[in-house]
């Protein structure tokens, strides 16, 4: 220990210079958008590559568990077979409907999870697809078992996803049995459960009810599974229920995801912005 301290003391000028250089680089990244974006994308790609390698090693030693999860996901996909994909009539000529064509609203892109956190208040997931696969920020992320999150940022070969296990992120939800709308938001404690909010007392939710996406936010198709109600409470004088939902997707075992590309999202967003401007 004495030798280490002596070494640091003898080279104090160099270590001071190195600390100042790092501090200056940090100031440049923090206060310049272009340099900050470049640094984030470069570091994101490097970290993602390292995570991809480590995840590959873990997958090798957990092949039986991965195969089991794939079997469960395949079973869930088979249940969805036969459901018609939503399409709309989109007139080429506004004067006649005979020239209309069917426009596919959603496309789906598969990706592999290379890094995943469930232990923080704000959790993120890294996947092995990026700009080269057509991914963009704002795209929804699901699995055959349920909602996963939303793409936050992309590099050429990787993307970072805001997990539904993020205390600042909310998803518009629907009680499948009653048709009532609410919002799900993680409370930051249990990665297996999420809170369903804004369900008023006149609604009668019960344990076992399914909670799915409402389709209101243009990110997810309507009806994507979120979870099953596990506990319902109504405090005296409260305007809304306290509802605890068991997530359908176990995030500790998340291996593969599906990216949802909504071809009509930009159109929906633009028309809603027009209304917002008119109402101001």
Image (cartoon, grey):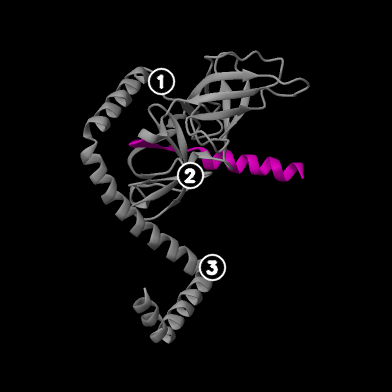
Residue 139 location in percent, x, y? 46, 42
Give the camera-side residue of 117 and 37. Answer: 117
Residue 82 as seen in the image, left or right of residue 26 = left
Residue 85 location in percent, x, y? 41, 24
Q: Which mark is residue 19?
A: none
- What secondary structure is marked by label 2? strand
For the point 67% across and 15% down, which residue is it? 203
Q: Nearer the viewer, mark 1 or mark 2?
A: 2
Q: Which residue is mark 2?
A: 123
Magenta stretch: includes residue 40: no
Disc 1 and disc 2 in contact, CB within 8 angstroms: no
Residue 188 as seen in the image, left or right of residue 142 = right
Q: Which residue is mark 3?
A: 30
For the point 51% across and 73% down, which residue is it? 28
Which comes sooner in the sequence, label 3 or label 1? 3
Residue 98 showing in the rendered view: no
Residue 73 as seen in the image, left or right of residue 104 = left
Q: Which residue is mark 1?
A: 84
Residue 66 location in percent, x, y? 27, 32
- Give the CA separation, mark 1 to mark 2: 34 Å
Disc 2 and disc 3 in contact, CB within 8 angstroms: no
Q: Which class describes the residues within 10 Å of circle 1: few (<14), some (14-19), or many (20+)?
A: few
Residue 157 location in percent, x, y? 33, 53
Q: Nearer the viewer, mark 3 or mark 1?
A: 3
Magenta stretch: includes residue 275: yes
Q: Which class describes the residues within 10 Å of circle 3: few (<14), some (14-19), or many (20+)?
A: some
Give the camera-side residue of 259 and 48. Answer: 48
Which comes sooner in the sequence, label 1 or label 2? 1
């Amino acid at each position: 220990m004495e030798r280490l301290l002596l070494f640091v003391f003898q080279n104090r000028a160099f270590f001071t210079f190195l600390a100042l250089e790092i501090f200056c680089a940090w100031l440049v990244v923090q206060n310049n958008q272009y340099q900050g974006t470049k640094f984030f994308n470069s570091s994101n790609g490097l970290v993602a590559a390292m995570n991809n390698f480590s995840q590959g090693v873990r997958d090798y030693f957990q092949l039986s568990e991965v195969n089991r999860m794939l079997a469960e996901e395949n079973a869930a996909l088979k249940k969805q077979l036969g459901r018609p994909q939503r399409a709309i009539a989109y007139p080429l000529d506004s004067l006649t409907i005979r020239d209309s064509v069917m426009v596919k609203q959603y496309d789906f892109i598969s990706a592999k999870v290379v890094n995943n956190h469930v232990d923080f208040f704000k959790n993120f997931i890294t996947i092995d697809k990026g700009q080269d696969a057509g991914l963009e920020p704002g795209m929804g992320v699901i699995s055959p078992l349920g909602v996963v999150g939303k793409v936050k940022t992309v590099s050429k070969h990787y993307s970072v996803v805001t997990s539904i296990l993020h205390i600042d992120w909310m998803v518009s939800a629907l009680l499948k049995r009653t048709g009532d709308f609410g919002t799900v938001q993680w409370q930051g404690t249990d990665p297996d459960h999420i809170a369903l909010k804004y369900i008023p007392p006149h609604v009668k939710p019960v344990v076992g009810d399914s909670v799915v996406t409402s389709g209101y936010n243009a990110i997810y198709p309507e009806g994507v599974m979120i979870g099953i109600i596990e506990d319902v409470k109504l405090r005296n004088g409260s305007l809304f229920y306290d509802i605890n939902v068991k997530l359908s997707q176990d995030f500790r075992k998340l291996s593969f995801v599906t990216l949802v590309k909504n071809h009509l999202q930009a159109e929906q967003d633009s028309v809603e912005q027009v209304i917002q401007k008119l109402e101001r």
